[in-house]
Amino acid sequence: MAKVTVVIAALLILIGCVGYFGTPTAEPSSPESNAAETADAAPAAPSKNSVTALIPAFVGAILLICGLLSFNEGMQKHAMHAAVSVGLLGFLAGAGRGSMGLGKFFSGDPSLNTRSFIFVWLMAILCLVFVVMCVNSFIQARKRREAEGN
């Protein structure tokens, strides 16, 4: 599971980086604002990207640390339990945040930031898949230990 953890972490970091660095920093300007800018008005400063777009990358960074620690045989159990806890929190955060936009998404509300909505659900789905894989791995490990003990 250590390799799987590192792969999931890399995907989450990628989602976070694309969400943050791939997002345009300025809103498209309207014709009225273009006229105001040409009439000796100072151009508006571009808006900054929200740090919340990096949340999947933060979750991925913690998972990456746990995954790398789990390559050490003595730390494997603790690191993987920490990793599955982080994965569960990532799923709950992503699904909780994503569920708030479901009504707007299905109604086609233009005020919904579709890009953010998709990235939040990508994080939630990746974390859920990771948690399910970890739980399955824990069950299989317990069965192996019990079979060896008998």
Image (tube, rainbow, N blue to C red):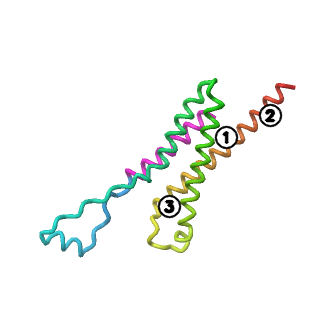
What residue does disc 3 label?
117
Position of residue 148 in the picture relative to residue 113 (left or right) = right
Identify the residue at image location x=57%, y=49%. 90
What residue does disc 1 label?
134
Asked if the residue at tag 3 contacts the one at tag 2, i.e. Cβ–Cβ closer than 8 Å, the answer is: no
Secondary structure type for disc 3: helix
Q: Residues within 10 Å of mark 3 (few under 14, many from 20)?
A: some
Say which amino acid is labelled 2: Lys
Q: Position of residue 105 (x, y in %)?
A: 53, 69
Vertical placement of 114 versus 149: above or below? below
Asked if the residue at tag 1 contacts the one at tag 2, i.e. Cβ–Cβ closer than 8 Å, the answer is: no
Q: Is residue 4 magenta?
A: yes
- In this view, which residue lies farthest toward the right? 150
What residue does disc 2 label?
143
Position of residue 16 in the picture relative to residue 100 (left or right) = left
Q: What secondary structure do most residues of the magenta stretch adopt?
A: helix
